[in-house]
Image (cartoon, rainbow, N blue to C red):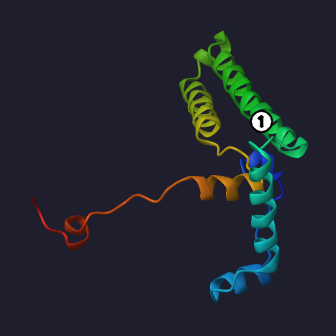
Amino acid sequence: MLAASPRAARGVGQKAERQAIYQLRRKGIVPNVRREAAKEILNELKRGPLQEKPWEKAMRERNELERKTYLEEAQRLRTKAAEKEIKQDQRKQQFLLRAAADLERFARTMSKAKSKRQATVEKATTKAPVKSKGADQGLER
C-alpha cells in the first residue's frame, strides 16, 4: 500500500500520537489532554450510557464502505479470472485469484475504526486477565 493513501483505506482509524504526548507518556507523566478526556468520558457515563457521536458514526460507516468496496473488487477480480480469454493464460488467472483472496483477507482483518474516545472507553471497560501465582512462576500442576 502507498503511504499516501487515506488512513481509512488502509484500515487505520486514528492519527498518530503527537510526539510531545508520546514523550510525556514514555516518562510516566499523564498529559493534561488525556486527563481531561478521561474526566469528560466519566461525566458522560454518569449521565447514562454513552451515545455514539456523529463523527464516530461517520467513521464506522466509512469503515464499512471500505470493507464492502474491497469485497466487491475481489469479486470483480474472480469474475475477470473466470473469463474465457483469461482461463487460457494460467499465470494471469492465478494472479487474479491470489489478488482476490488477498483483498478478501485484508477486508476481513482490517481493523475497525475507533476514535480516541472509543478506544479510551474500551480500554477502561475491559478487565486485564488475572494471572494465578502458579502461572507466573511457571509451575505445573
Q: Is residue 22 left or right of residue 65?
A: left
Quarter of the figure with residue 139: bottom left
Up/down of 108 relative to 23, above or below? above
Q: Residue at x 73, y 51 (%)?
A: 118
Q: Amino acid at mark 1?
A: Glu
Residue 116, can we see it? Answer: no
Pick the front one: 55 or 90 = 55
Pick the front one: 86 or 79 = 79
Pick the front one: 54 or 3 = 54
The residue sitting at the front extreme is: 46
Quarter of the figure with residue 102: top right
Q: Residue at x 80, y 52 (%)?
A: 44
Up/down of 67 relative to 48, above or below? above
Q: Residue at x 76, y 38 (%)?
A: 63
Task: Give the labeled residue for mark 1.
Answer: 66
- Residue 98 in picture, x, y percent from top left: 56, 33
Q: Is residue 45 left or right of residue 82?
A: right
The residue sitting at the top extreme is: 84
Up/down of 83 relative to 38, above or below? above
- Residue 22 in picture, x, y percent from top left: 71, 80
Q: Quadrant of the C terminus?
A: bottom left
Q: Residue at x 68, y 86 (%)?
A: 29
Residue 22, can we see it? Answer: yes
Q: Is residue 19 left or right of residue 26?
A: right
- Residue 123 in picture, x, y percent from top left: 61, 58
Regarding mark 1 in the picture, which secondary structure is present there?
A: helix
The residue sitting at the left extreme is: 141
Quarter of the figure with residue 75: top right
Crowding at label 1, few (<14), some or many (≥20) Cα neighbours within 10 Å? some
